[in-house]
Amino acid sequence: MAIYQYRGRNPAGGAVDGTLQAGSRDMAISQLMQKGITPIQVNQHASSAAKGDKQKSSTGKVTSEELVLFTRQLYALTKAGVPIIRALTGLSESANNKGLSFVLQEISDQLVSGSDLATAFKKHPQLFSPIYISMIHIGESTGNLDHALIRLVEHLEMERETRKRVKSALRYPIMVISAMAIAMVVITMFVIPSFSSVFNKLGADLPFATQILIGISEFMQNWWHMLLAGLVLTYIGFSQFIKTDDGAVWWDRVKLKIPLLGSIFERVALARFSRSFSMMLSAGVPILSTLSIVAGSVGNFYIGRAITSMATGVERGEQLTNTAMQTGLFTPLVLQMMSVGEETGAIDKLLDEVADFYEQEVDYELKQLADAIEPILLVFLGALVLLLALGVFLPVWELSGAVSGN
């Protein structure tokens, strides 16, 4: 509860002022009206506002595990018949994450002031996705909030497992590439210069591989600060570019063309689309609204833009299958299943099958990813070791041979 200062007029027209506690400014005005006071000015007390700002600034990031746990707990309480305000208040008090606790208390206060549940959740887009809010709205409107929450739990758990599988598959190659990059920096900055000074003193003709290594080492030593500044500026510029709409679409399109990884990113996004689309259609969300919401939740702006074009086509009266075919993203098998779903009126069930199909393909490709990347890394590592061996030890062998000959 926040403290509000007010000035107003009583029923006799006299000026009145004072303070009161309320969950929001609208709630404070409502309390004044119930007392017969016509509010002229209602402002949050400075100390109360500062306290609220301090709470907001101390809110931590809410992980996917914590969001799944909260949704499952809210489902259990709702199914047991606990009033939603009491459930949110209790979860706020028991939450270990201060950020989640603060958000839940704010939602509870907004419900007390007369707001509906979906609107209260919508005020926290950094935590609740458009799909989450839409499912809450559908569940609240139909009186099946517990059903909507359990569908959300399944959706969130599937998203979490997909992210874990992708991260797990990429962890090994990223670690190997990082170790190789660090090794190259150490060798070129510290190891090669030691050998280079010895070779220069001897004045012998150096092999081509050695000349390459010495040239790279001298370039790194003379221009390392410029290289570092260039890398930092490039990273900052690239980060800012991909935050723009066009930059995000371009980068997500490039990611789909990365060898070995692009097809995985594409199938993960399409599995999200199919699962989310099916879930929202089965909940009764209109198809145009479903497409618009799902377009922003697939995790890929390029595919999201294609889904938005599907919504435009459906709005013109085209069939969903035809619009999906025009994007060029879906396989013939998936398009056939969409077509059958449109004809039979069971498109939500068939899209669930499509999601299963894509998820199975993602699992298979993730299992094959390590087997496909490992030979490439070994070849690259072998070529690097060969270059270093030839560059460093070949002159030593030649010099030792010359000394033995003399």
Image (spheres, rainbow, N blue to C red):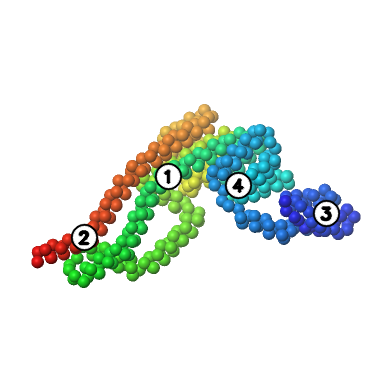
156 versus 346 height, above or below? below
Q: Quadrant of residue 266?
A: top left
Q: Amino acid at mark 2?
A: Phe
219 versus 25 height, above or below? below
Observer-nearest residue: 189 or 123? 189
Which comes sooner in the sequence, label 4 or label 1? 4
Q: Amino acid at mark 4?
A: Asn
Q: Residue at x 51, y 29 (%)?
A: 343
**Which residue, given by chain and number where applicable, does mark 1 sit on?**
168
**SS label for mark 3:** strand
In the rendering, at what x and y percent does residue 365 appear? 38, 40
Q: Quadrant of residue 389?
A: bottom left
Q: Residue at x 64, y 55 (%)?
A: 55
**Which residue, given by chain and number where applicable, does mark 3 sit on?**
38
Question: Does the rendering let one see residue 232?
Answer: yes
**Which residue, given by chain and number where applicable, does mark 2 sit on?**
393
Which comes sooner in the sequence, label 2 or label 1? 1
The reply to whether the C-beta atoms of the residues labelled 4 and 2 are less than 8 Å apart is: no
Q: How far separated are the C-alphas under marks 4 and 2?
A: 59 Å
